[in-house]
Image (spheres, grey):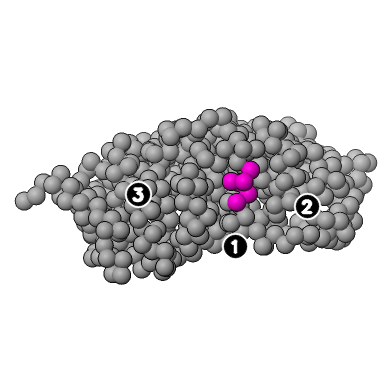
Amino acid sequence: MPTLRTLFVGCCLAFALPASAQDEKKTPDKADPEQLFVDALSADKLLTKGEYKRVQAVMSSYFEKKYADDIRTAFGDDYATLTKFLADNPELRDTLYTALDPEVDQFVEALTIFRELHKLGPDKLKAHANLAVALCVVWDNPKAVYDYRGHQRRTRSTLPTDPMKVGWKENYEYLLAHESELKGAVQNLPWEFLVHMVNNRTPAAERDWATKNYVKKRAGIGSIYKEIVYDTEMLRTEQMNGGGKGECKLTGQEYTLEGIKKYGGVCAQQADFAARVAKSIAVPGEYIRGEGNSGGLHAWVMWVELKSVSKDKVEFAMLSEGRYFGDQFYVGHLEDPKTGRPMTDRDMERRLVTLGVAPEHARHADLLMRMYPYYKERKNPTPKQQLAFVKKMFEIFPHCERAWQELAEIAKDGKTVEPPDAVNLANKAIVSFGAFPDFSWSLFDSILTSQKDKNQRGSVFEKAVLKYETLGRPDLACECRIKWAEYVEEGKDYKKAAEGLAQTISKFPAEGRYVPKVLDKLADVCSKYKDGTKKLGKFYLDFLPRVPKTRGTEVTEYAVKVYEQAYDFFKANNMPKEATQVESILTTLKKAKPGKL
């Protein structure tokens, strides 16, 4: 009976035959590539730190066998030349083939781009491998690329150059032609960062303008958001007439980077300008949109403030400009440049930051999890064995997104994860993603399925609430506090539930999107215990003066909402004095004209 080591070596040898060693007129052997990988994966050595290169090579060889027809179709008449080039440059080959993901990438389109990149110069391609990979995984689906034409249509300006004519080739040629000015910024960054740079349709003339005026300001580049003079008349008239119907200084002018700088705009133009200038001078950056605590929509810019890059680490800060603190834009949105799917800026930041800490460990665990479905199908591991496999990923890379998501799925059966382990894993998620609470919050319910003790479940949610409050995330804190209160209610400790809800409300008196919902929950809980109604009445009187009544010169919907809640409560509970007091303020709010409150 062969040992695991013998099996592993045999499988690696099976993968090792390069495509260039085969008859170029013959399709490479595709005999059950998944089983070969699964057999190799069964050797536990691949599941330990330090084995990234081996895993990458196995995955790359799997790709060559599994998608041999796609490779031949994409490479066409250049098949022999390109397979030899890749065999001679195995690191580039393995990076390319493992960056391509069957769930999201279009292989023929991506590899066709690679073929054309090779035609532009093999030596250039070797020197800019990560840039080439980024272009392949972004431009295989051009719909995923950031499209700024909506801003031009909104301002009713003109486009001197059609941005849809700018593609992967224009990005590649511009970055290489200006490499000395850009100080080789694209050569060292991992492709996962570069996808946020090459999803750029800005024409060459505008990039020239950006490079000339801003390359020396690369440090803190996002701050140029503030250089765009805000068009207050555009905002005012759009509020009256609707989006795209405002009086804009850009109307009739050219919608270019220089034009935006000259004529100004609202936050959308500020963010578009800063993001496209950043991309044009080789800084990964994105246009982000979101909703503030007053319900208003807004746009800002995020970018990678690079400090240093090595094979083992990318030191950088993920910064933003225009994400005004007072409006609490907790979560922003963009399209993933690799997939075209909606994603949050929090996910983008988490993925880049955790990857930057240990790029090889991050890729190692992710590749193993990508092949995990085949492992499950062929080896039919028990749920406990599946759990053990996933936990090994945490040893390789504690932030592996796919592993945590698979853990949550495994835990849903309520049997595989023991109750104490469920609590430990939930707490581990809080710690592992301390700076990225959105992700840990998405995991709790599933991970804790087996833990039926309400006190134990509640303790995890209370720990999370305190973490979210400390991080200044009332959106998560409020949602989590309501969930915590439900567990406490089941134990009929209504007073404790009310005190916790009141604590979170008091922490965030300006949070208009979430506090009304928690107030409703607080009113429900207070109705269930002695003196609860009396305490809620006192809470309202203490809390209402802390609620901001205006944003700028406008009365907020939030202020009206909570005063209405308070009035309804006092009226329903026969507190006429308090009801009259609140009603007076509410009437003033509803009648107030801008700037007259």
N-terminal-most mark, 3 or 2: 3
Image: 268 above or below 75:
above
Question: How far across and down, in percent of the image, does residue 154 sit?
Answer: 79, 59
In the picture, the quarter occupied by the C terminus is top right
Disc 3 marks a residue whose amino acid type is Asp
Local secondary structure at mark 3: helix
Residue drawn at point x = 61 percent, y = 59 percent: 167
Q: Residue at x 60, y 41 (%)?
A: 179
Nearer mark to the viewer, of 3 and 1: 3
For the point 48% across and 43% down, the residue is 127
Residue for point 42% across, 52% down: 96
The chief SS type of the magenta part is helix
**Measured along the vertical axis of the image, is residue 37 above or below residue 424?**
below
SS for tag 2? loop
Relative horizontal placement of residue 1, taking residue 416 as reference (left or right) = left
The foreground one among 458 and 309 is: 309
Tell which of 558 and 21 is nearer to you: 21
The kind of residue tagged 1 is: Lys
Residue where numbered disc 1 is placed: 143
Name the side, left or right, on which 100 lies relative to 554.
Answer: left
Residue underneath mark 2: 256
The answer for how far apart the CA atoms under marks 3 and 1 are is 33 Å
- Give the left or right position of residue 142, taking residue 157 as reference: left
Disc 3 + disc 1, Cβ < 8 Å? no
The first of marks 2 and 1 along the sequence is: 1
Location of mark 3 (residue): 88
Q: Residues within 10 Å of mark 3 (few under 14, many from 20)?
A: few
Does residue 496 show up? no
Q: Position of residue 326 (x, y in %)?
A: 74, 36
Query: In the rendered structure, which segment of residues is drawn in magenta?
Result: 173-178
Name the side, left or right, on which 386 lies relative to 194: left
User: Where does residue 372 sit, x and y in percent of width and height?
Assistant: 31, 53
